[in-house]
Image (spheres, rainbow, N blue to C red):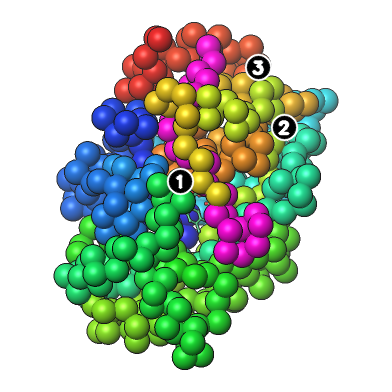
Amino acid sequence: MATLGLVGPFMTCYDKTGETMIIRGLFSEIVDRLVERGGAIHPSLVRAGTAFTSWIVAGHDHVTPFDPEILKKLLDNMLRDEKVQVLYHTSFVSPVMEGKSLKRIIVDSKSGLQGIAAKVFIDCTGDADVAYRSGVPCDKGNEKLGIMQPASMFFRIGNVNLEEVEADIQANKHNFYRKNGVNYRSFHWRVEEARKNGDWSLDRVSIGMFRGVAPDEWSINTSRIMGIDATDNQSLTFGEMEGRRQVEEIFKFLVKYVPGCSNAKLLSSASTLGIRESRHVHGEYTLDSEDILKGRVPEDTILLASNSIDIHGRFGPTSNEYKTVEDGNWYGIPFRSLIPQDVDQLLIAGRCISATADAAGAIRVMPPCMGTGQAAGTAAAIAAKTNCNVRDIDYHHLRKMLIEQNVFLPSN
Ligand SMILES: Cc1cc2nc3c(=O)[nH]c(=O)nc-3n(C[C@H](O)[C@H](O)[C@H](O)COP(=O)(O)OP(=O)(O)OC[C@H]3O[C@@H](n4cnc5c(N)ncnc54)[C@H](O)[C@@H]3O)c2cc1C
């Protein structure tokens, strides 16, 4: 999503007070390398309520603006340096099981069908494709309500006049709609005007526009496509075409109505539709919203995060729910949430780990996804080296190794 999906900025990696960077490890290594290359602004320098956060206050302190073009090249280089064998353009097709153990996967690509054997697999597909087809029980979105969060097509624009944009925001700050400290509604005064003129047909009432590293480059997170099922290719195709249609309408709106955007250029729309939610794996532990809001830190915590529960569109296209940690400054994601039920030698990382739909609304953002990836990778390495079942890994040993890799896991 950070590269093909043009999603940005990286959501906060700090604790609730905004004092301590709590998502470190591989995430902070990537950020530091991006900063060195002029491809990011370090989150310590980025505050809530500014152009970098689309003027949102709650939960958005210390986000990381980054340039997806520079990130792409950096990630390729890091993989090359570590001699990782990468296969782009390759899709998972099916698992090969021996009893409960995942032994091989079949993949499809221009080379045809291939089998890949491994001691441990990690499902980072976002949609839990490997887990689901291997027989792990999964939820799809919020099963009780029968819905998933809406999809969006991100796009980036350039040649924006920052001063003019800021001036319009400052002149209209009294107009911001606030709920739980969050002002969702930047430029709603312009959207209302456009709607009256017949220039706005979308269900959104305001604009999410996030300043990038360069002051004239912005990421636009405004399109909304309801009812998309990311596990169904017809639905995905419809969503992607509808997303591009919406991008065109939003871009025309920006040029015509938003001061500072009259000379803006459309740099690119995302190459793939942005998916907020699809399957949630059932694991040894299911993280829920109480765990997050009450700031619980289980003994087998592999990552601390403070990201807020952010659920779009549950009560119709314009609804947004946003809940921030109530007790303490962070919560812990347990190793057990990365271990799926029923299938051995498989771990899960990213937005499809074992969590309720509400809890996934918090841990789905990119810094915690990278953190669960690092923990799953480290656990897989332990299991592969010691020939053990991933379920039997001693979490004390795993935590020790993560701490050695600069993951922030204080003992109390
Ligand atoms: C509109 C939108 C706005 C968002 N805003 C923010 C934000 O501002 N900040 C933030 O930090 N986060 C944001 N997020 C959340 C975040 O981008 C995603 O939740 C996160 O990137 C998920 O990471 P992941 O690694 O689990 O999945 P992804 O980033 O989706 O990666 C999954 C990878 O698996 C591959 N894959 C999938 N299926 C298969 C298969 N069958 N075979 C082979 N490969 C496969 C995909 O090609 C992809 O490379 C937003 C998300 C959306 C959609």
Q: Quadrant of residue 367?
A: top left
Q: Are marks 3 and 2 in contact (CB under 8 Å)?
A: no
Q: Position of residue 77 (x, y in %)?
A: 31, 46
Residue stretch rendered in magenta on the structure: 295-320
| Label placed on residue 180 | 1
| Mark 3: C-beta under 8 Å from nearest atom of ligand 1 | no
Q: Tag 2's secondary structure?
A: loop
Q: Position of residue 354 (x, y in %)?
A: 65, 32
Q: Is residue 54 left or right of residue 225?
A: left
Looking at the rendered structure, the kind of residue marked 1 is Asn
Q: Position of residue 161 (x, y in %)?
A: 20, 74
Q: Where is 393 relative to 96, above or below?
A: above
Q: Which residue is mark 3?
A: 391
Looking at the rendered structure, the kind of residue marked 2 is His
C-alpha separation, residue under disc 3 versus residue under disc 2:
14 Å
Q: Which residue is mark 2?
A: 282
Q: Where is 81 relative to 189, above or below?
A: above
User: Dot 2, crowdedness within 10 Å: few (<14), some or many (≥20)?
Assistant: many
User: What secondary structure is the magenta-colored segment mainly?
Assistant: loop
| 299 magenta-colored | yes
Q: Is residue 233 left or right of residue 150?
A: right
Q: Position of residue 179 (x, y in %)?
A: 46, 51
User: Closer to the N terminus: mark 2 or mark 1?
Assistant: 1
Q: Tag 1's secondary structure?
A: loop
Q: Nearer the viewer, residue 385 or 264?
A: 264
Q: Is residue 21 left or right of residue 347?
A: left
| 382 magenta-colored | no
